[in-house]
Image: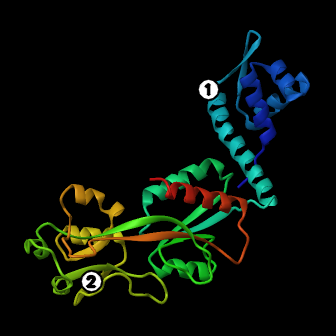
Amino acid sequence: MKAPRVTLEQWRTLQAVVDHGGFAQAAEAMHRSQSSVSYTVAKMQEQLDVPLLVIEGRKAVLTEAGEVLLRRSRTLVKQASQLEMLAINMDQGWEPEVRLVVDAAFPTDRLATALKAFMPLSQGCRVQLREEVLSGVEDCLLDDSADLAISGMSIAGYLPHQINQVEFIAVAHPEHPLHQLQRQLTHDDLQTQLQVVIRDSGHHPIDAGWLGAEQRWTVTSISTAASLVASGLGFAWLPRHAIERPLQQGQLLPLALQQGTHRSHYMYLYANKDKPLGPATRILADLLIEHSMTN
């Protein structure tokens, strides 16, 4: 690929001529001589071999080609400025990326709200978002692949910041045999039915929650578990926020358990303890805390 013949400064000069209404005005705004501005634009047209401006009376007017190229050049100049600003920020300790690992049971809407609030403050910092289940979050902290992590577990050696509770509900399809009993259900009733559980994504999976059913099918995501149970296959404890729609539409119905129909688990925010928090990571952590605590 050939090196560009036109510089960013030349594009900025053309933009100034158009935005300020002429060569003299552009020269004043850019603190340059009018002859310098005129020469720059003339040189551009020569290098591109495309007329960009025509003089109508005392005013320089864009040609059709000039309008197209000017519009594209604004994006180019903006991106170049952002790139330079990112370099400055990185030199000042601003991270180019924050690695965020979140337990799949954490409410997606609260996560999205925090990330949306972070966007205008990010200064070019990217977010690498990863979902894990149970001990999978802990593994990411231990192998240094997470800067921030949200987990429902107590992770040894890390200081947690309690952020919110996630409610789990025992549910099944309305026509499931457990609902047909039309009475409060005991653990003995559950033991005879198929339970759908979500697989722990960690390297050393742990058993969590009630696993008393003799027959269990294991899936890798909450959405898959919800879909299977809503289709009439088995029962499961699922986060309320993930099944609001099927609950409202009558595809899922809470089980009438003698105890344990509803269970709440706290979620905790952890930070990588092996390196100090950078400014972008700290801002994102504060936003996650703020928006997770909002009802």
Q: Amino acid at mark 1?
A: Glu
Identify the disc placed on residue 131: none
Q: Residues within 10 Å of mark 2 (few under 14, many from 20)?
A: few
Q: Position of residue 97 (x, y in %)?
A: 65, 63
Q: Position of residue 291 (x, y in %)?
A: 52, 54
Q: Amino acid at mark 2?
A: Trp
Circle 2 residue: 217
**Residue at x 42%, y 71% (from the top left corner):** 265
In the displayed structure, does residue 241 sit left or right of residue 120? left
Q: Position of residue 260 (x, y in %)?
A: 28, 75
Q: Residue furthest front?
A: 258
**Residue at x 23%, y 87% (from the top left corner):** 213
In the displayed structure, does residue 86 sit left or right of residue 38? left
**Residue at x 67%, y 33% (from the top left corner):** 70
- 280 or 170: nearer the viewer: 170
Circle 1 residue: 64
Residue 46, visible in the rendered structure: no
Callout 2: SS: strand
Q: Earlier in the sequence, mark 2 or mark 1?
A: 1
Callout 1: SS: helix
Quarter of the view holding residue 229: bottom left
Q: Position of residue 82 (x, y in %)?
A: 71, 48
Q: Residues within 10 Å of mark 1 (few under 14, many from 20)?
A: few
Q: Residue furthest top?
A: 57
**Residue at x 62%, y 47% (from the top left corner):** 120
Q: Quadrant of the N terminus?
A: bottom right
